[in-house]
Amino acid sequence: MSYGHVETVVPFDDLMKSISLSSVKIYDFRKHDCCFVGETEKEILKILYLFQCDNTDMELNYIKDLVDNIYIKKTFDSAKLISESFCAGNIFFQNPIFYLTMNNDTNVINYDFVNKKYINIGVN
């Protein structure tokens, strides 16, 4: 809304509703104060990015993996409206491929409390 794209509020709500009502997989959304993006959020960004690149066939495949069959059309239409609105305002989604290959767990410290030792320290 701060970018003046109020018309994307309803399509975004519809997109999230389709995802939340689906049971295709376990979804990963992070807390609002988390510095990392959840796997489901990456998939949503990937779908929107592919739509802006006019790669609707690949986007449809990702949508099928994300939502139940009864929500595919609604999700597709919502993502299309969101992407078109952002494109019209010269706002483009970044290619999320590097997010998908990046391991966000580099700051996790694993500790074995039974043996009282560190298992893997991800911090360099």
Image (tube, rainbow, N blue to C red):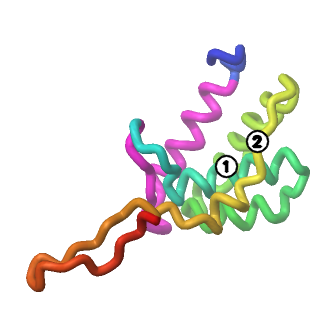
Task: Decide which of 69, 106 is in the foreground and name it.
Answer: 106
> Residue 99 magenta-drawn?
no
The furthest residue to the left: 114
Task: Decide which of 105, 124 is in the foreground and name it.
Answer: 124
Q: Disc 1 or 2, which lies upstream in sequence?
A: 1
Q: Which residue is mark 1?
A: 45
Q: Which residues are magenta?
A: 8-32
State yes or no: discs 1 and 2 in contact (Cβ < 8 Å).
yes
- Say which residue appears at 45% left-offset and 59% top-offset: 27
The furthest residue to the bottom: 115
Q: Quadrant of residue 91?
A: top right
Asked if 40 appears above or below 117 in the picture, the reply is: above
- Say which residue appears at 31% left-offset and 67% top-offset: 109
Gap between marks 1 and 2 measured at Cα = 7 Å
> Residue 22 magenta-drawn?
yes
The furthest residue to the front: 124
Task: Decide which of 49, 112 is in the foreground and name it.
Answer: 112
The furthest residue to the right: 54
Q: Is residue 18 left or right of residue 53?
A: left
Q: Which residue is mark 2?
A: 93
Marks counted in the figure total 2
Tell me the SS state at disc 1: helix
Task: Decide which of 69, 85 is in the foreground and name it.
Answer: 85
Tell me the SS state at disc 2: loop
Q: Is residue 69 left or right of residue 55?
A: left
